Amino acid sequence: MLMICYCPIFAQDHAIATIDKLMSSQFKPNEPGANVLVAKGGKIIYHKAFGMANMELTVPSDTGMVYYIASNTKQFTAVAILQLLEKGLLSLDDTLGKYVKSIPPVSQITIRQLLSHTSGLNGNGYRDSLNIPKGDTRQADAERYAARNMTFVAGSKWLYNNGNFQTLGYLIEKITGKTYPDYISENIFKPAGMSASIVVSGDEPLIKGRATGYSIGRRGILNVNLHNTQDLYASGGILSTATDLFKWNQALKSGILLQKKTLELAFTPQKLTSGQTAPYGFGWYIDNLRGSAVYRHGGAVPGFISETFYLPQVDVYVVILINSESAVIPQVLARIAAAELTDQPYRFQRGEISPQNLGKYAGVYESEKPEKVNITEENGKVYWQRPGGRKYEVMPSVTDEFYFEKDFLWLEFQRDEKKKITQLVFSRAGYTPNTWKKINKPVLRLSETGQEL
């Protein structure tokens, strides 16, 4: 019995230590930093601040720091729309023409299509909004989006577009008679207990604990000034903390914001008219982590990057908030951290290739583009090389899985029902995977710089 109780605790402690080592390697104490929170089973098991919140004043980050969550705002806009659905104030099949001055075919776009980025509406969110003269109303903004030509027939494609959620923000205001910030505050922040969160409106009061945004690049660390913040609006205008986002996730699970069956609509991938499935529900990407469902979203505005990542089957939630634009990829860090709390972690430590697998990986693999990669085996080691490129050794982790020494690059060989290797998947710990099929050609003879011999 002692072993039964001890082992899960030891495993979690080991996972937390691994997560801390991972995050500590990404954020330097004397540079802009981050807040990282990991929860499991509704309890925070890891929460740590890294780096500096303000470089000029030498203010270190702490766990109460306030950050722009950028496009993670879309989750809140989607839930607000679904709340109005529950109240009978709208239908997901209501058309844009019911609320916004427009003509076909734009007027026939549905709320469902706006929520899922399948509308074909022409717009690029705040980048377009910056071109709108000051003094324009939200109604004028929505009508300007509606006046543009569509980029594709509604429902036929999926294309991420901030304009969809800017328009939804206006619909919330028109239907409720409240401003978007007031509606979100009264109907989401307050019930969820999110006391540190706010929707920027351009004239908000002093926000205690707000981090300053920076960029980190070839020119060093630079200030990033975020102008016209009110134009971030319903697609990217929320400021929050890691703790408040944990409360947000808890509130969604508890049912105090939406009924479970209504919330499930947000987590349902949308079907296109072609029969294909979009990678998005309403305000969330629908992804997977080694076969487990994932509901996630990323976000970026000048000076800030964010990621929220939820594994519903094991109730693991990861929040990463960063006050800089840098080479750090929070989507990858979240995947690795979440996987640590499952039975299939990513192991970036060298293992052994079993004798029965030696010689099985070599071959030429081709992508859809088509591009080729040459996999060779020499003296019990496996190498990756593309024609015209350098040759890299890939380190064995577990059976059929390898990793590169940097950038969290991951390689997984996949087999058919006869256990024959048929393809490889190349990704950053499963993020943006690319599949390469093994073709019936001998291994290429390439020089160290990728030239054919």
Image (cartoon, grey):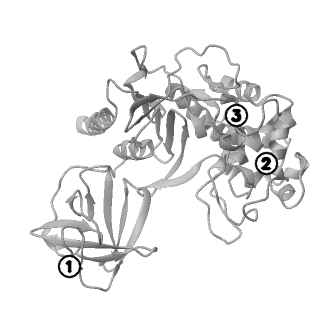
- Relative side of 16 to 179, left or right: left
Position in image of residue 128 (x %, y %): 70, 44
Residue type marked 2: Tyr
User: Residue drawn at (16%, 71%), measured in percent from left and top?
Assistant: 377
User: Residue drawn at (53%, 20%), measured in percent from left and top?
Assistant: 210
The tag earlier along the polypeptide, 2 or 1, is 2
Secondary structure at numbered mark 2: helix
Position in image of residue 113 (x %, y %): 74, 55
Residue type marked 1: Arg
Q: In terms of image quadrants, where is residue 381?
A: bottom left
Residue 259 visible from this viewpoint: no
Viewport quadrant of the N terminus = top left
The residue tagged 3 is: 231
The tag earlier along the polypeptide, 3 or 1, is 3
The tag earlier along the polypeptide, 3 or 2, is 2
Q: CA distance from mark 2 to mark 1?
A: 54 Å
The residue tagged 2 is: 145
Q: Residue furthest left?
A: 379
> Between 376 and 78, which is closer to the camera in this rendering?
376
Q: In terms of image quadrants, where is residue 202?
A: top right
Residue type marked 3: Asp
User: Residue drawn at (50%, 27%), measured in percent from left and top?
Assistant: 213
Instruction: Decide: few, some or many residues near mark 3? Use Cα within 10 Å; few <14, some 14-19, many ≥20.
Output: many
The residue tagged 1 is: 445
Above or below for 179 versus 90:
above
Q: CA distance from mark 3 to mark 2?
A: 14 Å
Secondary structure at numbered mark 1: loop
